[in-house]
Amino acid sequence: MKSISMKLIFGLSALVLLNVGVVSGAEFEEGKHYKLVKNSSETQVDEPVQTAEEGTDEAVELDTVEGETSNSEISVVEYFSYGCNHCYRLELFIDAWLATKDEDVTFSRVAVPTRDDWVPYARAYYIAEDLGILEKVHSLIFRAIYVNKQPMGQKRLLKRMFTGVAEIESEKFEEVWASDRIPKMVQNAAIELRDLGVDASPTIVVAKKYLITPETAGDLGLIFDVVDFLVEKIKSERKMEDSTAANESS
């Protein structure tokens, strides 16, 4: 009986190790787990995107992505909406990933109006961004919508949260609410959405080259596994390019 039990234990242990090996050795496939961004190019990663407003010759710099990415950094951008339940559920995975990501990997969000009735939610994000209170209210907006069932695209609810929780002066809120900056930011987000070929949220774009959705990853919980895979892929390709360039110059 003892020998049978030991054989069973060893057999189960081997099976566990085999499964671990399969998972750790798994690779994600282009076209299946992630896609190439439409018109993607390595040279696009750090270039500012500009567009001209209708009826004017003035170029408008796209200013929806927070911060700038240097040539050595790899950008990870989430295209999301407060109106998207999957985006709300993805927040836990984002928080966990942010705690472990490499320092040379940057993360930012773009609030996108993938539906006409989600435009007010994009406005809410950019008003908070303009006021400099995103860290204070971002998760609270999600919670208000999905836990407290409040339509946070409404002015009175946003104002109550921003003045109460973030201690923004009422006059300052009114000023930003009425400013031309916010519609322009929503418009720029819609243009960026179109140019990248993003048609749903949440969508994660890595280095402006690779696109990941819950459908391509297979599950919300796998999205950042694919992100990490692509980050390592990009780093490996860069090292190979640097090595080739060094050999050619020597």
Image: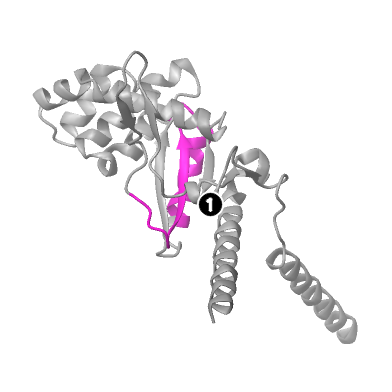
Image coordinates for residue 124, horizontal then vertical, percent: 31, 27
Q: Residue furthest top?
A: 55
Image coordinates for residue 131, horizontal then vertical, percent: 20, 35
Query: Residue visible at 52% across and 44% down?
Result: 205
Image coordinates for residue 77, horizontal then vertical, percent: 46, 45
Image coordinates for residue 20, horizontal then vertical, percent: 71, 69
Q: Quadrant of residue 19?
A: bottom right
Left or right of 137 in this view: 81: right
Q: Nearer the viewer, residue 160 or 200?
A: 200
**How many residues crowd around disc 1 within 10 Å: few (fewer than 14), some, or many (20 or more)?**
few
- The answer to whether 104 is drawn above or below residue 32 in the figure is below
Q: Quadrant of residue 145?
A: top left
Q: Nearer the viewer, residue 74 or 165?
A: 74
Residue designated by label 1? 42
Q: Is residue 141 visible?
A: yes
Specify start and end residues of the magenta stretch as a single range.
68-97
Left or right of 94 in this view: 64: left
Q: Nearer the viewer, residue 41 or 183?
A: 41
Answer whether residue 110 is magenta in the image: no
Q: Residue furthest front?
A: 249
Query: Residue visible at 52% across and 36% down?
Result: 202
Tell me the quadrant of the picture where the N terminus can be found.
bottom right
Answer whether residue 71 is magenta in the image: yes
Q: Residue furthest bottom?
A: 3
Query: Residue visible at 73% across and 45% down?
Result: 32
Query: SS class of the residue under badge 1?
Result: helix
Numbered circles on residues, count = 1
Amino acid tagged 1: Glu
Tell me the quadrant of the picture where the C terminus can be found.
bottom right
